[in-house]
């Protein structure tokens, strides 16, 4: 209620400037109109519900008479202002409409100010609940990006995107997915492409990490609550190392992206010449690849570079690095630097070991990349890969295996692949990348823990074991919870899309899994989705980006301590 009232105030203020605009931004005006009406209806619904719950109705009405009359008056003013804006009522209709808009905004301001304390309490609640804070921060960036993409200056046509298309594109960019309902090259102007680039960078790093980086740079102090939030995001238990961790993440991100930009600039210079266009394309694709976004500035993605190992190879390396997670990259960097120092000094020194998480992520990722390469080549060497030379076939299969679990670039056409290839790709996309990375899916760590548990179960071991280290039952339960959550979300979304879209079920399942895994690969049906279909895919991208555990943590209720134990029961299973 508090957020709705403040959004209504902002919307009414925006509509004051947008209602009579001559450019085609009617989508924004319609949105603000509905939001203002929704605010008033919520106020009236609150009054009615409180009246129904009140024991003494007459006393309640007398005490809340001002609020009731205010809500009714705002509703009448809102309806009347819209009526005047849409109709010609006398000579002074335009002046009356402006006066009514001003009056409406003032009343909404009064209603909003009455809710300040409640809003502050709600913000305090969010500070103590990191999962809700993360979700809200992503939602704010997505909505802001959607509004920008609806502006005329972001499109080549000068009209901006519709609200649903802008919301879909913004969600895809912030959630680093890459699914698009419009062609990024032909639909967006240079300004629009810059907006998408910024959304990808913000979504890849996370708005909260960027915020804390800014705080650290200006040397402001950080509260304990804020440190708890950032430690939750980074899965870092030692809060004394948060500053160093955030600075390392930022330096790693910009360092790798800068290196990728330099290499891609060399490659694109052979296409566009030594020009600013080649530099922008290098920056855009470097950021898109490392953040695992899959957005490309070519209508055919990267199909024209299928035999170009410099460009495709650089992008593949960026994707792999982005999908390993910052924690693994830092740990791997420490290990390699210590080994290099010992080699240069020609003596044995201390080498920081790889953590269990790093070993698992590197092992499973390597296995999936190699396995995906062989499977894609095996199923498509006589089909989609047939026109290419043998070396290009293997390289294309490797590139698609890399992009399968995290980034939606494609170097071969996806419309005519075999059904078996689609099923293999669905399994790989569902797994995704590493926890704490820019990838989606259920994560490779989840798969590793489930494998360890099942392996130990069939060997009659008491606990799951990985690399000679035991895995707690709590982690096993979380892994199975994530697996079930992913299956349920993708299954429900596929069912809804099967009812709303006239497409083959396998292609719909592919699209839904690609969205949940924030992969961005498509069989070509994205632009043909209905409004409901685009909204469903947007929800899937959002859930896949913030992660199943964050969704479940945000939706879960606080546990209540108790000492009650129930008698054990037996259930027949299997």
Image (cartoon, rainbow, N blue to C red):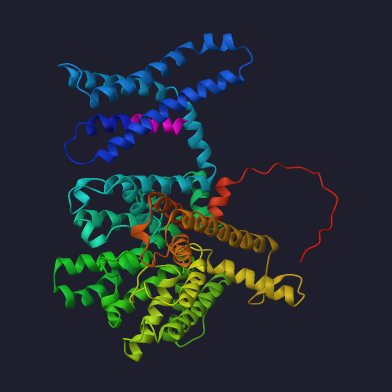
Most common secondary structure along the magenta stretch: helix
Q: Residue at x 53, y 66 (%)?
A: 443
Residue situated in front as seen by the camera: 339 or 31 = 31
Q: Does residue 110 show up magenta in the picture?
A: no
Percent coordinates x, y for residue 148 in the rendering: 27, 46
Q: Residue at point 51% right, 24% down? A: 46
Of all residues shown, which one is farthest toward the bottom?
Answer: 390
Residue at 25% in and 67% down? 299
Q: Is residue 13 above or below residue 438?
A: above
Give the camera-side residue of 427 and 352: 427
Q: On the rendered structure, is 502 left or right of 57?
A: left
**Residue at point 50% right, 49% down?**
229
Question: Where residue 77 sits in the image (x, y, percent)?
Answer: 33, 19
Residue 363 place in picture, x, y as percent = 53, 77
Q: Which residues are magenta?
A: 1-10
Looking at the image, residue 527 lies above or below residue 361: above
Q: Is residue 537 left or right of residue 88?
A: right
Using the rendered view, name the quadrant where residue 244 is placed.
bottom left
For the image, the number of numbered tags is 0
**Horizontal side, residue 427 vs residue 298: left or right:** right
**In which quadrant of the rendered view does residue 200 lie?**
bottom left
Front-most of 78 and 117? Answer: 78
- Quadrant of the snapshot with the C terminus: bottom right
On screen, residue 561 versus residue 354, left or right, reads right
């Amino acid at each position: 209620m508090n957020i709705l009232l403040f959004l209504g105030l902002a919307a009414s203020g925006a509509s004051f400037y947008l209602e009579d605009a001559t450019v085609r931004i009617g989508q924004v005006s319609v949105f603000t109109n509905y939001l203002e009406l929704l605010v008033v209806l919520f106020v009236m619904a609150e009054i009615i519900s409180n009246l129904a719950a009140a024991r003494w109705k007459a006393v309640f009405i007398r005490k809340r008479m001002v609020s009731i009359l205010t809500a009714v008056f705002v509703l009448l003013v809102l309806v009347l202002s819209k009526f005047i804006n849409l109709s010609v009522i006398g000579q002074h209709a335009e002046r009356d409409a402006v006066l009514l808009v001003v009056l409406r905004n003032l009343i909404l301001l009064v209603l909003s100010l009455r809710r300040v304390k409640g809003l502050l309490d709600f913000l305090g609640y969010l500070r103590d609940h990191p999962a809700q804070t993360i979700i809200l921060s992503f939602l704010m960036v997505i909505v802001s990006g959607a509004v920008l993409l609806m502006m005329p200056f972001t499109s080549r046509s000068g009209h901006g995107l519709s609200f649903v298309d802008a919301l879909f594109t913004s969600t895809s960019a912030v959630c680093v997915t890459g699914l698009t309902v419009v062609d990024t090259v032909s639909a967006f102007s240079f300004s629009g492409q810059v907006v998408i680039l910024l959304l990808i960078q913000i979504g890849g790093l996370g708005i909260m990490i960027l915020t804390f980086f800014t705080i650290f740079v200006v040397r402001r102090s950080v509260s304990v609550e804020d440190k708890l939030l950032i430690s939750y995001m980074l899965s870092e238990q030692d809060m004394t190392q948060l500053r160093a961790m955030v600075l390392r993440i930022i330096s790693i991100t910009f360092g790798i992206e800068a290196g990728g930009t330099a290499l891609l600039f060399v490659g694109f210079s052979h296409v566009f010449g030594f020009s600013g266009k080649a530099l922008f394309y290098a920056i855009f694709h470097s950021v898109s690849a490392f953040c695992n976004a899959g957005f490309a500035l070519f209508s055919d993605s990267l199909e024209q570079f299928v035999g170009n190992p410099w460009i495709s190879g650089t992008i593949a390396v960026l994707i792999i690095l982005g999908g390993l997670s910052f924690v693994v990259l830092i740990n791997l960097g420490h290990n390699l630097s210590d080994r290099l120092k010992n080699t240069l000094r020609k003596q044995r020194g201390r080498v920081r070991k790889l953590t269990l998480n790093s070993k698992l992520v590197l092992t499973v990722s390597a296995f999936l990349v190699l396995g995906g390469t062989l499977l894609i080549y095996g199923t498509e060497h006589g089909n989609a890969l047939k026109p290419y030379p043998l070396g290009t076939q293997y390289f294309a299969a490797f590139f698609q295996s890399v992009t399968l679990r995290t980034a939606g670039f494609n170097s071969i056409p996806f419309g005519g692949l075999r059904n078996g290839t689609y099923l293999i790709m669905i399994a790989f996309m569902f797994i995704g990348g590493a926890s704490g990375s820019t990838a989606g899916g259920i994560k490779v760590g989840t798969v590793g823990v489930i494998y360890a548990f099942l392996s130990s179960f069939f060997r009659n071991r008491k606990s799951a074991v990985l690399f000679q280290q035991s895995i707690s039952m709590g982690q096993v339960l979380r892994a199975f919870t994530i697996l079930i959550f992913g299956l349920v979300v993708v299954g429900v979304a596929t069912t809804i899309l099967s009812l709303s879209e006239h497409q083959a079920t396998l292609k719909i399942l592919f699209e839904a899994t690609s969205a949940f895994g924030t992969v961005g690969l498509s069989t070509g049906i994205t632009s043909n989705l209905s409004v409901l279909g685009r909204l469903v895919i947007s929800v899937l991208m959002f859930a896949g980006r913030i992660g199943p555990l964050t969704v479940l943590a945000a939706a879960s209720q606080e546990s209540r301590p108790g000492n009650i134990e129930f008698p054990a029961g037996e259930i027949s299973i299997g």
